[in-house]
């Protein structure tokens, strides 16, 4: 028997897949029902409004991201920049490949959040886990002003992920190019 929590997860997972495949325009309660393989009306039963569905989807993204980041934590007290570069390269590569749907959905939601303050607040809160992790990693690498520099690092890494997934450059970056770019960014931040 499926619990309410399992049903909500199934619905929000289907919303993530729908966002990745069809964008925000394609995200309807009916489309999510179809993607989840549920009876029509299931999505609207759990999430009455589009805003409720969007907020729940952001929350689900955060849960899935936390699970994906679990191998990076717990962190050692000291970490060298080479290992840090490898960890970050792995996160970028995984986001653009294994977790591609989630990354696409996050970008869709991020653009929508520029017009919906309530959605923006939720996404900013979710993004804090990445900024906090970056600050913790930089502190372990002996970097001063790790909080400020961690924010800059996350912004640079997000740009690399966007380039990898959207092909913003003339071609998508390969893993070795990402690794090289991450090392260059870290050299600038570690200074």
Image: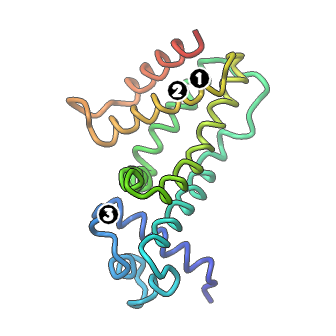
| Image coords of residue 86 (percent x, y) | 55, 27
Q: Which residue is mark 3?
A: 24
Where residue 173 sits, quadrant-wise, is top left
Q: Which residue is mark 2?
A: 152
In this orientation, which residue lies closer to the viewer: 171 or 150?
A: 150
Residue in view at x 32 percent, y 63 percent:
24
Residue in view at x 71 percent, y 23 percent:
139
| Image coords of residue 140 (percent x, y) | 73, 23
Q: Which residue is mark 1?
A: 149
State which quarter of the image contains the C terminus: top right
Residue in view at x 37 percent, y 23 percent:
177
The answer to whether 167 appears left or right of 10 in the picture is left
Is disc 1 surrounded by few (<14), some (14 to 19) or many (20+) residues within 10 Å?
A: many
Identify the secondary structure beneath mark 3.
Answer: helix
Where residue 18 sits, quadrant-wise, is bottom left
Question: Residues under labels 1 and 2: Cα distance?
Answer: 5 Å
Q: Residue at the far top: name it.
A: 191
Q: Please determine whether, in this image, residue 176 is positioned above or below residue 1.
A: above
Is disc 2 surrounded by few (<14), some (14 to 19) or many (20+) residues within 10 Å?
A: some
Identify the secondary structure beneath mark 1.
Answer: helix
State which quarter of the image contains the N terminus: bottom right
Q: Please determine whether, in this image, residue 42 is positioned above or below residue 65.
A: below
Decide which of tag 3 and tag 2 comes sooner along the chain.
3
| Image coords of residue 127 (percent x, y) | 56, 45
Decide which of tag 3 and tag 1 comes sooner along the chain.
3
Disc 1 and disc 2 in contact, CB within 8 angstroms? yes
Disc 3 and disc 1 in contact, CB within 8 angstroms? no
Disc 3 and disc 2 in contact, CB within 8 angstroms? no
* Residue 32 tag number: none
Identify the secondary structure beneath mark 2.
Answer: helix
Is disc 3 surrounded by few (<14), some (14 to 19) or many (20+) residues within 10 Å?
A: some
């Amino acid at each position: 028997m499926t619990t309410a929590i399992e049903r909500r997860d199934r619905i929000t997972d289907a919303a993530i897949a729908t966002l990745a495949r069809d964008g925000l325009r394609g995200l309807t309660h009916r489309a999510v029902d179809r993607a989840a393989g549920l009876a029509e009306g299931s999505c609207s039963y759990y999430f009455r409004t589009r805003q409720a569905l969007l907020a729940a989807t952001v929350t689900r993204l955060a849960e899935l991201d936390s699970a994906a980041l679990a191998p990076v934590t717990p962190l050692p007290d000291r970490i060298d920049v080479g290992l840090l570069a490898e960890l970050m390269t792995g996160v970028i590569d995984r986001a653009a490949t294994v977790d591609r749907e989630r990354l696409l959905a996050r970008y869709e939601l991020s653009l929508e959040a520029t017009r919906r303050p309530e959605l923006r607040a939720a996404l900013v809160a979710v993004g804090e886990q990445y900024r906090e992790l970056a600050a913790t990693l930089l502190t372990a690498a002996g970097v001063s002003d790790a909080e400020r520099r961690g924010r800059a690092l996350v912004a640079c890494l997000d740009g690399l992920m966007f380039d990898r997934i959207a092909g913003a450059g003339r071609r998508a970056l390969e893993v070795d190019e990402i690794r090289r770019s991450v090392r260059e960014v870290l050299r600038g931040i570690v200074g």
